[in-house]
Amino acid sequence: MNDDLLVEARLRAWLQDGPAEAPRRAIAAALAHADAHPRRAGRLGLALRRLHVTLREGLAGPRRPVAVVAGVAVLVVGLTLGSWLVRPIATGPGRTLEDRTPSSAVDRCTDVRYPTQIDMTRWVAGRLECDVTSTDPRATGARSVALSSLTVGAEDLGTGFPPHDEIYGRGTLRTAGGAWHSVFTGQADESQRLVGAYFGTGAYTGLELVEIGTSPDGGAWTYRSWIEPATAGSVPPVGAVTPAVPGATPAPVELAPPDLAAGTEACVVLNPGREERAGDAVHVRGERVRCELASADPRLAGTLELVRAWERLDDGGLSTWGTARLVTADGAWAGPFVGAWQPQLDPGSTIARAWLVPEAGGAGEIILRDEGTATERVVEAEIRP
Amino acid sequence: MERALVERARRGDREAFAALVRDAADRLYAVAWRVLRDADEAEDAVQAALISMWDDLPALRDPERFDGWAYRLVVRAAYRQARKSRRREVTVRLLPADPVGEPDVAAGIADRDAIAHGFARLTVEQRAVLVLRFYAGLSVPEIARMLGIPVGTATSRLHYGLRAMRAVLEADARPAPGREDPG
């Protein structure tokens, strides 16, 4: 201990030496930037201008401090335009998939609240309200989205994934016939994949609306979306956790910074489910997985059970979604999850997020982030008691 | 005073922003320089942080948190700067040795050299935590919150950073023939 204190003292003294003044050029450059970019009303407009620049230059290129803003705008595009492509699907794996490349309709969303930066890597509690028009009336209505963003550094989290930005959150789509509740996640890296899984309530109970956006070359985004029967027995308790109610007086979005907890994960497949090929994708439904979570935080340590669906495209991309149930010493938590395969890494490398609420009802939520390869997985949780 | 400036700058007041920048630039540069140990890279990092300050200020919800938020911007910029030069050898500015100096002075210089040597071997993430802890005077929970990492991760970076520093200093203190290069 004494040696440690001595090292600290020597380091502390050594750190006192150094320059006292910042170069004036840096200050002048920042002021010139402010002069050249006067702040205008309407942050969404700024976000969208940045998006166009970012997409043109390619999100897979050098990282930019505005990546989160671009991510937000990408989300607007995805959630709005993806819904246009929804079509009735009678059965699960046997459906026909079709790619589209939308180009407009971003203005259907209103930026109600810009995400707030709560620490160096996290932006939370952004909020969008969207009017959604779909070819399927079941998906035509008003969508309310709460979104966050995370900047992942190579050594910040997990298993050595390349640095990238992620956007994630939850949403509600209210239509004339019922409502859909979702969790979504996406990353602005080489995979360029955005996945959202909406679980139906009311008249849509037993159905799920899946939206997948991709932009593997960093250019225009392609979306595919559809409605299909939910994986048997997997409907989460979304009715109790509606995150935001569209309307004249939107429900408040939780702004409090979350508690953070981290741990590791070891998983086994209990049931591989059924696998079928349709079009350009292999579809897996009903896979059951059990994971043991180890963490110094008892709120994260426990058993996680997943019921998963997969879409494995011939282009190498893969998306997954389903439901998750976490049992800890404090009780059971349940909700939907979504994720995407990182095709530039080993098979089985995914980043997924689950949105969990107390199974017994009541307040609180966990946004669980799962990252890893086939052999090494880590988890991180944003916990709001 | 500063709160009023922050609020004005958030609304797009260029003069208020200029006052904030002039007030914050020196201490942000001090942190960036200590993390990166390179004047040019530190200047680039501070410039990027100040530009982000203008772009992202509307998203700063609580003006009272401006100082921590500004540190966050510059550390984030330092990370990016370090990654740009990841493949380059870390440049450490050492004080020139004075072969004819007094023994105490020479010993002091040697000590600083050893510390600089150890510091240069750390990851940029570890260096940032050490600078924020022992230069900026932040607590570990404050650092964790600012960097957006669990407290355990911040503690780990601090622990392993200090351990690596200690290993280098101990190796440096051994007689020359037995000196080893840890790692």
Image (cartoon, rainbow, N blue to C red):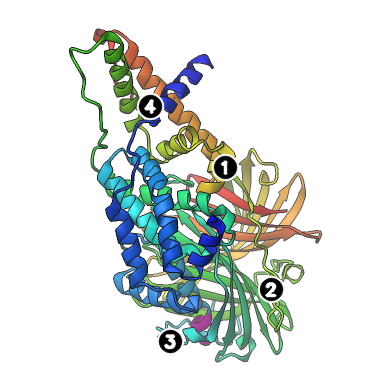
Secondary-structure class at tag 2:
loop
Instruction: Tell me the chief SS of the magenta region.
Output: helix
**Distance CA(mark 4)–CA(mark 3):** 56 Å
Residue at left offset 56%, top offset 89%: A134
| Disc 4 from disc 2: Cα separation | 52 Å
Q: CA distance from mark 3 to mark 2?
A: 25 Å
Q: Give residue B165's position: percent from left, percent from top.
A: 40, 25
Q: Chain of mark 3?
A: A
Nearer-N-terminus badge (4/3): 4
- Kind of residue sitting beneath label 1: Glu
Return the residue at label 4: A14
What type is the residue that disc 3 sits on?
Ser
* Chain under disc 1: B
The amino acid pointed to by label 4 is Trp
Mark 1 Cα-neighbour bin, 10 Å: few <14, some 14–19, many ≥20: some
Mark 1–mark 4 Cα distance, whole angstroms, equals 22 Å
Q: Is residue A110 above or below residue B183?
A: below
Residue A306, quarter of the rendered image:
bottom right
Residue to which mark 1 is pinned? B142
**Residue in the image at 50% along x and 47% along y:** B147
Which residue is at the front of the view, A26 or A1? Answer: A26
Disc 2: host chain: A
Q: Which residue is mark 3?
A: A104
Task: Say which quarter of the image contains residue A30.
Answer: bottom left
For mark 4, give the secondary structure: helix
Magenta span of residues: A80-84
The residue at which mark 2 appears reads as A244
